[in-house]
Image (cartoon, rainbow, N blue to C red):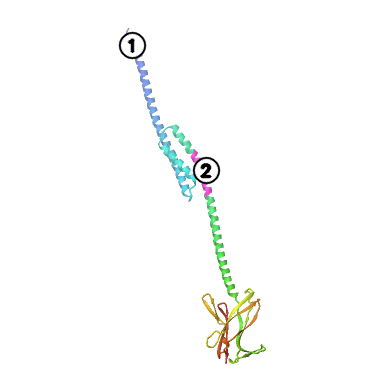
Amino acid sequence: MENKAQSSNRSLKVVLGILAVLLLATAFYTFKLYNDGEETAQQLKDEKSLVLKDLNNMAEQYDIAIGENQNANAKLVEARERIKGLIDSLKVSDNNVKSLWRYKKKYLALQDEMDNLLAENDSLKIENKLLATSLDSTKVQLEERTVFTDSLLAQNTELADIVETAAVLSTVNLNGFGVIVRSSGKLIPTERARRTDKIRVCYTVTKNTLVIPGDKEFFVQVIDPKNNVLGSNQQIQFGEKTLNYSLVSKFNYENANLDICEFITASDDASFEKGRYVVNVFNEGNLVSNSQFTLK
């Protein structure tokens, strides 16, 4: 009976020992699981921080690329906004492997996209620089051409002014003198006022190849000693100039020297005054030659 009780006590001790071992094993396993869970949670948290950091770095690279362009590349702007949305989503996501892996896959895809977009953007920057250089060169050429054209225009204008100034008929050998007119038509020069029937004015139109041939006219003005304009004494206006003339001398110019003579009669068949006479020839309102003579 005593042996049976001792056997029962040994069995109980064995059972209790096994239970103690199992309890210790369970406690150790539970502790290990807890520690492993904490470590895993920290690793997931650290990994999430790294992904967020990478995404923020990516967003900053897009900001730099966009800031370097005066006109923002729409593809870069759209990609940056998607990254910012992903950052905001990741910040509030669960810390688990599945969730983190999904975001990491998106990050890797966005990394490839960014590499392509930035390479494309660099290519566009190079093309824009080349275009800007070309435009600057074209601008310089246009400015040089404009300067040349302005200079040429100024020269042409100056030349046109010179030609216009030079394309004017002039006269030489202007003479005025009194004449006696015989019934036969013969003319006899005289210096006597009382014997003068008419005043003869002669001059030579000089050759000027710049002047277009054709019908021309000069205005002859003869002023007597009392400062009266002899002849028709008509008045004509040239701009602000007013000219009283004795007669209009009309002729056909043919690019050659041309001798011309005109006659002035005294007004109302009165006799000519003694004294100094002035003869002027005008081309429109411009004086081209003048001379003097005296009747005694």
The residue lying toward the viewer, choosing from 20 and 83, is: 83
The residue lying toward the viewer, choosing from 43 and 141, is: 141
Judge whether 252 appears above or below 1 on screen: below
- Label 1 with label 2: CB-CB less than 8 Å: no
The residue lying toward the viewer, choosing from 66 and 249, is: 249
| Residue 276 on image: x %, y % | 55, 89
- The kind of residue tagged 2 is Asn
| Residue 168 on image: x %, y % | 60, 76
The secondary structure that most of the magenta stretch takes on is helix
Residue placed furthest toward the right? 184
The image quadrant that residue 200 belongs to is bottom right
Judge whether 89 appears above or below 144 on screen: above
The residue lying toward the viewer, choosing from 20 and 58, is: 58
- Mark 1: give few (<14), some (14-19) or many (20+) Cα within 10 Å: few
Query: Is disc 2 placed on a helix, strand or loop?
Result: helix
- The CA distance from mark 1 to mark 2 is 84 Å
Query: Is disc 1 placed on a helix, strand or loop?
Result: helix
- Residue 133 is labelled as none
| Residue 51 on image: x %, y % | 44, 38
- Mark 2: give few (<14), some (14-19) or many (20+) Cα within 10 Å: few
Q: Earlier along the polypeptide chain: callout 1 or callout 2?
A: 1
Residue position for label 2:
116
Question: In the image, is residue 113 part of the stretch drawn in magenta?
Answer: yes
- Residue 6 is labelled as 1
In this rendering, position of residue 44 left or right of residue 271: left
| Residue 198 on image: x %, y % | 60, 87
Q: Which residue is at a point 58% across and 68% down the rendered structure image?
A: 156
Give the position of the C terminus as an image quadrant. Answer: bottom right
Stretch of the chain drawn in magenta: 109-124
Residue placed furthest toward the front? 268
